[in-house]
Amino acid sequence: LCLQNPGDQPVEAEMRFHLESGEVLWEDVYLNPRSRTTFYANAMTPYQEGMAFSIHASGDIVVERPIYFSYRGKWTGGHVSTGYAPGEDR
C-alpha cells in the first residue's frame, strides 16, 4: 500500500485489514507533509488469507494499492488501483 500526504501538515492514518476470518487488524501510521510511504501489507498481517483494507486519516491523503505477481515462474505482471481518503475527525 502506498500512502501519499500531499499537504503541508502531518497526517495520522489508520490502516485496517479486514481478514476473511472476520478479524480486523489495524496499524496506526504517521505521514510527514508532502511525503509518500510504502507499506508491505503481507508483512503487516500474520496470516496468508484474503483481505480487504480501509484507510482512515486525519487529513486528505491519496492511497494506491499496487499488486505485482509471478505465477509459477512463467507469468509476471501487476496492476494498481488508486483511491482518495478524505480527512475526518478521529
Image (tube, rainbow, N blue to C red):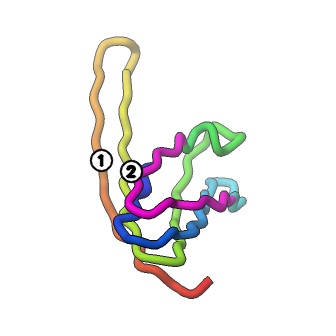
Residue occupied by mark 2 = 65
Quadrant of res 61 = bottom left
Vertical arrangement, residue 1 with respect to residue 69, above or below: below
Vertical arrangement, residue 75 with respect to residue 31, above or below: above
Q: Position of residue 54 (x, y in %)?
A: 52, 65
**Which of pointers 1 and 2 lies earlier in the amino acid sequence?**
2
Q: Is residue 35 left or right of residue 45?
A: left
Which secondary structure lies at badge 1?
strand
Residue positioned most to the top: 73
As measured in the structure, the alpha-carbon distance from the residue carrying label 1 to the one carrying label 2 is 6 Å
Which secondary structure lies at badge 2?
strand
Q: Nearer the viewer, residue 8 or 76?
A: 8
Residue occupied by mark 1 = 80
Q: Do the residues under discs 1 and 2 have CB atoms within 8 angstroms?
A: yes
Q: Position of residue 32 (x, y in %)?
A: 50, 60
Which residue shows up at 51% across the image and 68% down it? 10
| Circle 2 crowding by C-alpha within 10 Å: few under 14, some 14–19, many from 20 | some
Q: Position of residue 36 (x, y in %)?
A: 40, 52
Q: Which mark is residue 46?
A: none
Q: Quadrant of the C terminus?
A: bottom right
Would you say residue 31 sits in the magenta stretch? yes
**Looking at the image, how many numbered discs can be counted on the residues?**
2
Name the main secondary structure of what is drawn in magenta: strand
Which residue shows up at 61% across the image and 59% down it? 29
Amino acid on which the number 2 mark rests in the picture = Arg
Which residue shows up at 37% across the image and 22% down it? 70
Amino acid on which the number 1 mark rests in the picture = Val
Q: Which residues are magenta?
A: 26-40
| Circle 1 crowding by C-alpha within 10 Å: few under 14, some 14–19, many from 20 | few
Quadrant of res 85 = bottom left
Q: Position of residue 28 (x, y in %)?
A: 65, 61
Would you say residue 9 sits in the magenta stretch? no
